[in-house]
Image: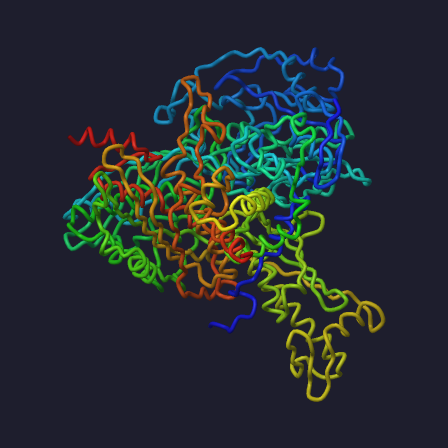
Amino acid sequence: MKKNFKVVNNLTPSVDGKGLMQGRNAYVNDLAPENCLIVKLLRSPHAFAKVKKVDVSEALKLPGVECILTKDNVPHVSFTRAGQGYPEPSPHDKFIFDEYVRYVGDEVAAVAAVNEEVANEALKLIKVDYEVLEPVLDFEKAFENASVIHPEDGIHEMFPIGFDPKKNLAASYEMEVGNVTEELKKCDVVVEDTFYSQAQAHAMMEPHSSFAKLDEHNRLVVYSTTQTPYHVRRIISKTLGLPVEKIRVVKPRVGGGFGGKQAFHGEMFVSLVALRTNKPAKCIFTREEVFGSTYTRHPMRISLKVGADKEGHIKAIDCRALSDTGAYGEHALTVFMIVGSKVLPLYNKVKAVKFGGQVVYTNHVPAGAYRGYGAIQGNYAVESVIDELAEKLHMDPIKLREMNSMKEKETSPIFEIMGEGTEGTAMIMESCKLPYCIKRGRELMNWDEKYPVKKVGDHKVRSVGCAIAMQGSGIPFLDMGSCTIKLNDGGSYMVTVGATDIGQGSDTIISQIVAEELQTTMDKVIIYSSDTDLTPYDCGAYASSTTYVSGNAAYNAASKMRERLLKEAAQELEVKPEDVEFDGKVFTSGEKSVTLDDLATGRMYNNDTRQIAVTESFHGKVSPPPFMAAFGEFEFDTETFEYKMIKYVTVTDCGTTINPALAKGQVEGGIVQGYGMASSEAVLYNSKGKLLSNNFDTYHIPSCKEVGELITEFADSYEPSGPFGAKSVGEIGIDTPPAVLCNAVYNAFGVRIHSLPITPEKIFEAMKAKK
Amino acid sequence: MLVKFNLNGLDVEYVVKPGEYLLDTLRSHGIKSVKKGCDASSCGVCTVLVDDKPVLSCSLLTAKVEGHRVTTVEAIQEEAGKLSECFSKEGADQCGYCNAAYALMVHALKKENPNPTEQEIRDYMVGNLCRCTGYQSQQKAIKAYLGGKK
């Protein structure tokens, strides 16, 4: 299946790296008109309250205030900020402004003023009469709590997701293969444990930003830091009652997303202001708003029972989870299901497996999509328990994984049962080099020398931990990407895609795929993404879909263009298309030949003139998972329990790496984000439900000094259904660090830390409890 | 108030509000390579050079640069371009939001310490947060760039 690639799988510079390093104006706030009204939001100081009255009369008198939006003057249509396809698997439980506020930071009103000072001054003049209600701040007490967070009318699920708001349930789910209770009874060894994960913040460097204006056709033009421009257009249309054709959504360069910008943020407010004032309006979130008023990772409690026979064959897994979706049910069900569907199939030889539980509302900052999307939470619990099982079996934890994990040409019944909020799709692993990844990673870490722990100083030890992971490549039968290629005079190609580059490099890898198929060089491919007026549809950047889904669309379009060019050249040479050969520059048939440059230029200006262009799409019929084996080495101080990462080894099977340097960037970036969740990113609320960890001083993301040596390799693998053999690689890197660190702490001290982040204080407390 | 300083080699006189920060002054005069990330001097994306030293412009009053030299990436285009090639080779360019600040940091580092060790690079760059790359690729790219200059 392998080709001798010329562009794909080669060291190809990214198409945009140089311009961005040189500081070109490319991001939403760089492109906003200078005369934008500034939109600022009045946010709730209460975790839960009824908004009885919003008096804006004094604020409106302030010179420079142009428009104030409240629940009294905006459409009252329920929607979800989740930014998903249609119909969404998230409940429609949000209004632009509502009669309730459900977390500290929830929106009460929006002010548009001539500048920031006036807007902020006006916020202070708005008088809000709140009836403060008892908030739900403990997610383990949310179900059927006396405080009902969504008592309002007009909210609904789009299809059955277990939505039961009167019980504070945003979603619930149950599945079982075989009979777990019976199988566990037959097991020689059963381990049980429970783990808690926190509401990690995305902390992308560019804050959520948007601006809107009316163009000369009086259409609404919205620029947004979004991962999903087409979904933004649809949701604005349905919520504001404005036809789709009246709206254009542009995603310029985006400064990191990680799932956080799949969500709606300021788009609805700037759109309403622009429509009402006929003036451009922009809303740039402060860092405090990014932390406290967008959405976070879903905090979870995950309880596992895993049973095996005494030889170490895992026979049954029972996984119960409780997820805190905060004030709104964004991605409530789908993140929850991924806990099971992108973790449990790793151990596919079980006789029975069960997964289920609830997603509850609380009065916390809402939770939503975040890289890993449930898999990191599930991985922390499952991969910790696998180590516990290995210990009980007196087995090497790597051997236990090798014996029980997924291999090529195998499957898991979970794939067919669990999909994106609905049933899934059966699939065989056509590419799965997980056994190689484990073996190679073990060597690279020099595991056998280092496991479990070595003394390296008076009060220093070094220990190692491991974990394996999987993810997906888009959502089968739902996620669609498309690509238009237009031939330019001179023989270059204009490629337009809806695929949303948010920094992960999709513009580059799509250009590579097109260049490879058309046997040309990167300088002959011009790419533009994404703009609902100009680029064909793409579901957006989520679910590890871009390389696989959008990449396949680009491959299909390039193949079609190639076919089309052969026909055009055959006409020109007066031969049959099958008799034409094309090397990327010249079409040849026997003695006759024509260059692409001449053909393209002629077709445009003087020779049977017509535009040569093609559009093709792709949706997956499977979602081939990338796989990873990860091994971490950490040094601990045995007196203070402080620790640092020494080395983190990963070997990943993502099929062909379209751009090996960018693929490495995805893996390493994911690891360090996951390591932040594992080690330092503590989420703190005060007793009234106000988020305290809401800036980079109080919420510590890793700096360059906390990262040890990263050794990142890829398995030699080829996914037959992927573009040039590729699978996606955007999320999988984040999944392993919590379990790897947890296992390393156990190997150092014999204590297991059951909540994230794993701090020296928690290790100290666990050591005290052990004694 | 009127503040006079040298911006990228040109003497400028800008009318600024009392309490105005350099980041806002620069962006309002078209220098948009300087980004706002946290507005609390804790992320590094607003880095500029004042008399060749890195400074966080979100927390520096514009009035304080009276009579000083302010440099943004607009003044070191060729160098930024070359550094980007090293970033690209290491897979260190992703969203790009922090990259112009990195170019300025590396420019300043090169002047202070033309041949730094990996540890010295880490020590110097510690205040420039990046959520995309995992840092190692950037460190390697910076090392390759500075090494290549020798």
Classify A769 as above or below A597: above
Classify A261 as above or below A109: below
Q: Residue at x 66, y 21 (%)?
A: B19
Location of residue A553 by image quarter: bottom right
Q: Residue A584: x, y in percent?
A: 65, 74
Q: Residue at x 53, y 53 (%)?
A: B146
Residue that sits furthest to the right in the current view: A606
A561 left or right, relative to A88: right
Q: Residue A692: x, y in percent?
A: 45, 23
What colouring style does the render use? rainbow
A621 left or right, relative to A29: left
Location of residue A561 by image quarter: bottom right
A403 left or right, relative to A186: right
Q: Residue at x 65, y 77 (%)?
A: A582
Q: Is residue A256 visible?
A: yes
Q: Quadrant of the N terminus of chain B?
A: top right
Location of residue A211 by image quarter: top right
Q: Residue A33: x, y in percent?
A: 74, 36
Residue that sits furthest to the bottom in the current view: A591
Count the numbered circles shown: 0
Q: Residue A287: x, y in percent?
A: 55, 30
Q: Residue at x 30, y 44 (%)?
A: A634
Classify A204 as above or below A448: above
A301 left or right, relative to B44: left
Question: In front here: A398 or A497?
Answer: A398
